[in-house]
């Protein structure tokens, strides 16, 4: 099984035009990596909040296997 060290980060930002965007989810190795990716998409934005949502790939793999076993029945 491939173990991933990525986490999901939720951002709340204010765009260059002043619009507030909630619930932007970006995957990254760490918060700095996720914010770098965010700033590539939303240049000159202001980060209002950031929350980390770590979920191990093992848990994701188990859930996938549960669904796959149900479909196979």
Image (cartoon, rainbow, N blue to C red):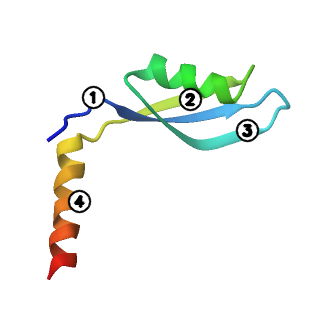
Residue assigned mark 2: 49
Which residue has dot 4 on it? 64
**Residue furthest to the bottom:** 73
Per the rendering, the mark at residue 5 is: 1
Mark 2 residue element: strand
- Quarter occupied by the C terminus: bottom left
Location of the N terminus by quadrant is top left
- Do residues under tags 4 and 2 come within 8 Å of each other at their CB atoms? no
- Residue 43, by quadrant, is top right
Q: Number of labelled discs? A: 4
Answer with mark 1 or mark 2, whichever residue precedes in sequence. 1
* Mark toward the viewer: 4 or 3: 4
Between 33 and 68, the one lying in front of the other is 68
Disc 3: CA contacts within 10 A as few (<14), some (14-19) or many (>=20): some
Closer to us: 18 or 60: 60
* Residue at numbered disc 3: 20
Please tell me how crowded label 2 is: few (under 14), some (14-19), or many (20+) other residues with Cα within 10 Å.
few
- Which of 40/18 is in front? 40
Name the N-terminal-most of marks 4 and 2. Answer: 2
Q: Residue at x 85, y 31 (%)?
A: 17
Residues at badges 4 and 1 in contact (C-beta under 8 Å)? Answer: no
User: Residue 21: x, y in percent?
Assistant: 68, 41
SS under mark 4: helix
Q: Is residue 12 left or right of residue 2?
A: right
Q: Are marks 2 and 3 in contact (CB under 8 Å)?
A: no
Query: Residue 33: x, y in percent?
Result: 47, 20
In space, the residues marked 4 and 1 are separated at their CA atoms by 18 Å
Label 2 to label 3: alpha-carbon separation: 11 Å
């Amino acid at each position: 099984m491939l173990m991933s060290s990525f986490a999901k980060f939720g951002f709340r930002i204010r765009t260059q035009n002043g619009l507030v965007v909630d619930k932007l989810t970006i995957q990254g190795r760490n918060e700095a990596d996720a914010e770098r990716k965010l700033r590539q998409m939303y240049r000159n934005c202001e980060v209002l909040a950031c929350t980390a949502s770590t979920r191990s790939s093992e848990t994701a793999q188990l859930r996938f296997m549960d669904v796959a076993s149900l479909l196979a029945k």
